[in-house]
Image (cartoon, rainbow, N blue to C red):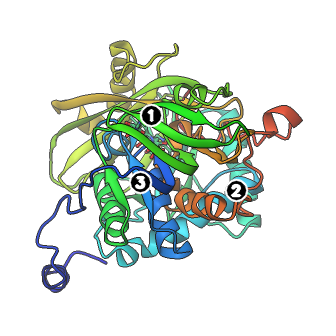
């Protein structure tokens, strides 16, 4: 649903009178069919699809702080499906298709804007890697095309393609259907829609322990607001997955890193698309408020600090000023960080665990926002049926034992 006064009126008539949180804040009950740990976009989407598509509504989504306050509210909202491996193409394309109708599905404007994502090549290696992705994507029916430097500049006129740049632009891959959405609207939209279907969303409720019965299966969680029983638990606690899974005695193949971003003061529209560069660790788009949204690579060291190293932001801004000289005199308004959990093959883990009743959805690293609808959709089916949804099936925890990895290091698009 696009913004229009007609749509506003429709929302008002349906009892949704404003822009912002309108879900029901619930008190915890003693027991639920399913407990989801983490009220980020993925956890809320999972709860919504469980209720909407599988008829399971006796669900609690437990959040240690405020809804959407984790990576969902901290990311730079880039959406694309130009990944390399067939398994990932299926997953991210599934999400992309859901994005296209998400505002209608949720009756909430998530401001999805497919304005095009341009990924720059600065050296021979980048050219080969991006072209390999383009060929793989086109074989799978996913749009992605090669542009010369001049064509890239025609698509994004403020891009500097001078040959004497430190990292000259030699060409770019363009996914036209890629773009951005409004991150907090995604969290709020899923929260409201799930809440309307009877899901309990419980904020300020930190899970501190996972209890297992004599058969080893999960039976309850201990929280800062008391014990809650459940036969099925879904862990969707990006950045802290290892901590939560350790409560059930499981060690995860994950490392947690800070990833940071910043926004400039608002200016008139200057940036028509998203531009990313893996080689120089910087990317930029423009929000609907006019702020230039700029992102950096991860810190080099593991940490749970929700802020990245200042030297990383400085390096990113140097690169941005070189690529987009028009930004040189802009003031930066805000800088923040989130904690991303990264797997060895840079692909997520979605599915069952060795503990009966315990399911996990994690390891999205620097790139899980784009997957939010698809991730929630396939994880809900997996939780409902107790077997992996076909699209989720390759993304097992078990692949780190069997060696059937899904290497997406080059598609991750942000240095990590
Ligand atoms: P979160 O939104 O982090 O939700 C997890 C929730 O679990 C949190 O709210 C947390 O408080 C809660 N939690 C943790 N422990 C507990 C506990 N013990 N009890 C209860 N609750 C708990 N991805 C893209 O696709 N495109 C981008 O442009 C992009 N840019 C990014 C930029 C930055 C700066 C960052 C940090 C990330 C970026 N990402 C991007 C990655 C993306 O944000 C994440 O992969 C995605 O948002 C993860 O969503 P989630 O719902 O799994 O996690
Ligand atoms: O996955 O596209 C992405 C992304 C961009 C910035 C951070 N992640």
Q: Quadrant of ligand 1?
A: top left
Figure quadrant of residue 263: top left
Q: For ligand 1, tell me if the residue under mark 3 lies within 8 Å.
A: no
Depicted 232 relative to depicted 140: above or below: above
Query: x, y percentage for residue 72?
Result: 38, 45
Q: Which residue is mark 2?
A: 392
Q: Secondary structure at mark 2?
A: loop
- Mark 2 vs mark 1: in front: 1
Query: Mark 3 or mark 1, which is nearer the start of the sequence?
Result: 3
Query: Mark 2 or mark 3, which is nearer the start of the sequence?
Result: 3
Q: Is residue 242 left or right of residue 265?
A: right
Of the pair 366 and 270, the residue shown nearer to us: 366
Does residue 154 show up?
A: no
- Mark 3 vs mark 2: in front: 3
Circle 3 packing at 10 Å, graded few (<14), some (14-19), many (20+), is many
CA distance separating discs 2 and 1: 29 Å
What residue sits 28% from the left and 50% below the top?
Answer: 286
Does residue 131 show up?
A: yes
Q: Is residue 274 left or right of residue 16?
A: right
Residue 222: which disc? Answer: 1
């Amino acid at each position: 649903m696009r913004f229009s006064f007609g749509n506003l009126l429709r929302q008002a008539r349906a009892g949704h009178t404003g822009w912002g949180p309108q879900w029901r804040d619930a008190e915890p009950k003693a027991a639920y069919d399913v407990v989801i740990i983490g009220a980020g976009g993925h956890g809320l989407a999972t709860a919504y699809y469980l209720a909407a598509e599988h008829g399971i509504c006796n669900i609690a989504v437990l959040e240690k702080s405020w809804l959407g306050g984790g990576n969902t509210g901290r990311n730079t909202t880039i959406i694309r499906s130009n990944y390399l491996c067939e398994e990932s193409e299926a997953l991210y394309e599934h999400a992309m298709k859901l994005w296209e109708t998400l505002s209608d599905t949720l009756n909430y404007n998530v401001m999805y804007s497919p304005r095009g994502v341009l990924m720059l090549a600065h050296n021979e290696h980048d050219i080969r890697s991006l072209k390999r992705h383009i060929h793989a994507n086109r074989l799978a029916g996913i749009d992605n095309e090669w542009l010369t430097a001049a064509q890239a500049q025609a698509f994004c006129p403020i891009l500097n393609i001078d040959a004497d740049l430190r990292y000259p632009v030699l060409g770019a891959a363009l996914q036209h259907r890629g773009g951005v959405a409004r991150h907090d609207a995604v969290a709020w939209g899923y929260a409201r829609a799930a809440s309307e279907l009877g899901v309990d969303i419980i904020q300020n409720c930190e899970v501190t322990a996972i209890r297992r019965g004599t058969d080893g299966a999960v039976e309850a969680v201990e929280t800062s607001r008391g014990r809650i029983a459940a036969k099925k638990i879904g862990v969707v606690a990006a950045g802290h997955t290892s901590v939560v899974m350790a409560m059930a005695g499981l060690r995860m193949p994950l490392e947690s890193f800070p990833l940071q971003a910043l926004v400039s003061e608002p200016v008139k529209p200057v940036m028509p698309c998203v531009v990313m560069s893996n080689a120089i660790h910087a990317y930029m788009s423009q929000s609907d408020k006019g702020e230039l949204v700029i992102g950096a690579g991860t810190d080099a060291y593991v940490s749970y600090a929700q802020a990245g190293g200042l030297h990383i932001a400085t390096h990113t801004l140097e690169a941005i000023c070189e690529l987009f000289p028009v930004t040189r005199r802009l003031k930066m308004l805000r800088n923040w960080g989130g904690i991303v959990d990264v797997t060895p093959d840079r692909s997520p883990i979605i599915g069952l665990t060795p503990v009966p009743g315990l399911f996990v959805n994690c390891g999205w690293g620097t790139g899980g926002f784009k997957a939010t609808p698809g991730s929630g959709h396939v994880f809900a089916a997996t939780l409902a049926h107790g077997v992996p949804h076909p699209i989720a099936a390759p993304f097992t925890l078990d692949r780190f034992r069997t060696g059937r990895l899904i290497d997406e290091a080059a598609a991750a698009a942000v240095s990590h």
